[in-house]
Image: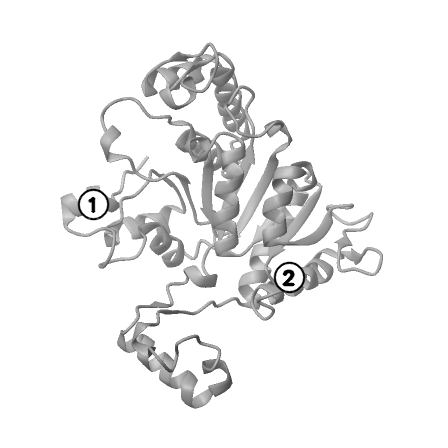
Amino acid sequence: WLEVYAGQTAYDKFGTWLPDDTLAAFKEFLVGIKGPLTTPVGGGIRSLNVALRQLLDLYVCLRPVRYFTGVPSPVKHPEKVDMVIFRENTEDIYAGLDYQAGSDEARKLLEFLQCELPASFAKIRFGQQAPDQIGLGIKPVSRPGTERLVRAAIQYAISYGRRSVTLVHKGNIMKYTEGAFRDWGYALAKREFGAVELDGGPWCKIPDGKPGARIIIKDAIADITFQQVLTRPDEFDVIATLNLNGDYLSDALAAQVGGIGIAPGGNINFETGHAVFEATHGTAPKYAGLDKVNPTSVILSGEMMLRYMGWSEAADLIIRGVAGAIASKRVTYDFARLMDGATEIKCSEFADNIIEHM
């Protein structure tokens, strides 16, 4: 293990939020795991998590969502939730092309639209009346970015025997970004995996005789998806989607199976092998050093890391340990207050409980 620094700890030690040595270590050693990072609110720097993803080109945010028996859930049948989300990590409106109202960048962009694309400028509400009070963002979605994401999702479905890959998008409104994502995804499935259309399309299936035979490639509108993952979650398996949709959807799904406190995540470049696994929740400085919070998110992220490295036996032991620890009802405070007959224990004691159940 090689410890490197980022976030508040790095700033306190070195006066920088993301040291060059940290980035160099991730580039050289390929695989790592991290806890939540504190990013200053407001000016200064954007999210450190986003910076790491973009600097290492970690184009997939991989978020498996599954239920462990006994975990408190707000839905009647959380056991039906078993999905893996492939969220595009480097494009969409999270690319950082976000310009403050009144800034030089926003002014120049508005002037360009007004001069070169007047029909587009006319669609900007208050573009004439209050141009210095308009913030602007740009939403890049590319064919190469789409194809490598969908390719990784389909290859994952083949490797792990999943039933379907759903392309989630808002292409009915954003036809040339989200709609293009859908179309490019289908085209890749046909070209690289031999998928054939079902009943005239656009849904398609990998035919018999091909790797991943009978996997269905389908699509769904994003807002309808949010409804259907609640009402019929068993119809979804692997989901491939753009950055913003994936951010919303992964946390909404996590809520169905116990919340982001136990939700793992990984940021991966399947082409170079670089991967950073992480707890999906934020920082909680008020609990630091109290031996109190639930460690399951980072532990399950460790399970993902081990499985990614090919250490499946160790990964299986972690899953068994977590399932047994939760079923024993000796859990951290966040679960204990919601589970009937539960005993509240410390963070370190819960970790010991996991080991005992491996």
User: Is there any visible trace of residue 114 in the rendered image?
Assistant: yes
Determine contact: label 2, label 1, CB under 8 Å: no
Quadrant of residue 83 within the rendered picture:
top right
Instruction: Name the side, left or right, on which 159 lies relative to 209.
Output: left
In primary-sequence order, the first of circles 2 and 1 is 1
Q: Position of residue 44 (x, y in %)?
A: 22, 59
Q: Nearer the viewer, residue 167 or 76?
A: 76
Amino acid bearing label 1: Ala
Q: Secondary structure at mark 2?
A: helix
Q: Residue at x 55, y 48 (%)?
A: 86
Position of residue 77 measured from the top left corner of the image (x, y, whole percent) = 63, 28
Labels 2, 1: front one = 2
Does residue 144 sit above or below 166 in this rendering?
A: below
Residue type at numbered disc 2: Arg
In this rendering, is residue 297 above or below 191? Answer: above
Q: Nearer the viewer, residue 267 or 21?
A: 267
Q: Quadrant of the N terminus?
A: top left
* Residue at x 30% of width, y 38% of height: 283
Percent x, y for residue 348? 32, 19
Please name the residue that numbered disc 2 is placed on. 182
Image height of 349 relative to 45, above or below: above
Q: Residue furthest bottom?
A: 115
Residue for badge 1: 10
